[in-house]
Image (cartoon, rainbow, N blue to C red):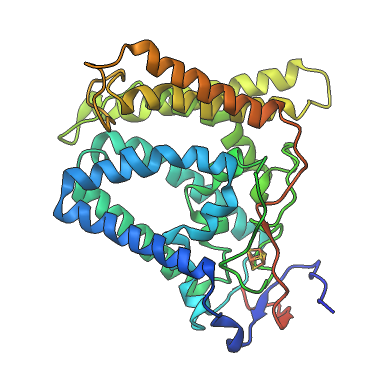
Amino acid sequence: MQPQPCTGVLNHVQQSKTLAIRPFSRWAFLQAVFWVLGVGIVLSLWLRPTLGLHLLWDGLIPLAPLLLVVVPGLWRNVCPVSTMGMLPHRLGFSQQRAMSASQRLQFQWGGLALLFVLVPLRHALLDTQALASAVFLLLAAGFAFFLGRKWAWKSAWCAGLCPLRPVESLYGFRPAATFANAHCGSCGLCSTPCPDATFHASRPGLVPGGLQPGPRKWITGSFVGFIWGWFQVRDYVAFPLGEEAWAIYAWPWGGAVMSYGLLLLCERLLPKPVHPKLYRFWACAAVCCYYSYRLPALFGFGLYPGDGMLIDLSPYLPSWVVFLGVAALCSFLVWWMLLRIASPAAWMRRPPYALQVTATPNASK
Ligand code: SF4
């Protein structure tokens, strides 16, 4: 019989090393493929900078929001940085320290801070400097690996400091499918609630991924304004200084504060309890705002010609065709996130519990 989850603070997790190395599966194959793709992107950033920048920022990243809306569990199973973070656990040399609730909250705020600092940095550095992007990817992978050596399972990176996680939590409340958890293999109760197997109801108290209330409220309210502000700034080939450097942060941060304030105002004015659709609407507005700017930019119709462009179709296509594409994609997102009747589902199934899960009060110190 499966052991029941520990309801108290889990301070230490001991895992049999035989559980750490898991048989090769289809998921392991996919993880290996995505890991090789990640290495390929880093190499191309180094050896073929223009190609690498296009692959990363104009190929992979624009697909990410859609992926997180429809199949967030798929991405979390194959993300190469997550694979690096779980490597110490899978090879049996992670210290498997458990995280207290306050540490978890600090890590989640840390992930949000990284998101809000790094994304504007794209305009100043990452979008145009391939070497900087390569270093950024290597640092993320190295940092995830370093944290995985110390902390249990996904608690430090995938459930904590990963800057993408708040966005996964915001967008992924109506997943198309629930997958097996390909990284964990067995559950050591590293986070409560589990970042992957939490039942999603998209209410402020029950957002997917188990974000704590503070980070959850901030990402929900601020992200649409943050995205809008981000697209008001152009890319700089040389690192901007002075007013321009301020602008790359002032626009997205200013937008974030405004949309967060607007959400608070709506909460105040609407009848209590506030309907969960308000929070879903804010999430849907964020992803629609993203594609309303990003799709035209990809095909040469952006606010700043050349920025974020994959292929220039502007000489061949009337602009209304691209904007029709935006309207179609946003209609799909509105239907998926707001109108569709969907059974609540988790991103992943929780695997069987690890052999030994014991509480030792001082282990997390
Ligand atoms: S399945 Fe268990 S070990 Fe894996 S992330 Fe969830 S709580 Fe942590």
Residue 257 visible to the viewer: no
The residue positioned 57% from the left and 48% from the top of the image is 72
The residue positioned 59% from the left and 38% from the top of the image is 171
Determine the residue located farthest toward the front in the rendered image: 316
Q: Nearer the viewer, residue 342 or 185?
A: 342
Question: How many tags in the picture?
Answer: 0
Q: Quadrant of ligand 1?
A: bottom right
Residue 216 occupies which quadrant of the picture? top right
Query: Which quadrant is home to the C terminus?
Result: bottom right
User: Is 272 on the left-hand or right-hand side of 353?
Assistant: right
Q: Nearer the viewer, residue 108 or 363?
A: 108
Vertical position of residue 221 compared to residue 5: above or below: above
The percent coordinates of residue 164 (x first, y second) are 49, 47
Q: Nearer the viewer, residue 356 or 297?
A: 297
The percent coordinates of residue 174 (x first, y second) are 67, 40
Query: Which quadrant is home to the N terminus?
Result: bottom right
Q: Nearer the viewer, residue 176 or 195?
A: 176
User: Is 314 on the left-hand or right-hand side of 193?
Assistant: left
Residue 363 visible to the viewer: yes
The percent coordinates of residue 127 (x first, y second) are 26, 38
The percent coordinates of residue 169 (x first, y second) are 60, 44
The residue positioned 78% from the left and 26% from the top of the image is 275
The residue positioned 39% from the left and 15% from the top of the image is 321
User: Is 88 on the left-hand or right-hand side of 125?
Assistant: right
Vertical position of residue 248 compared to residue 142: above or below: above
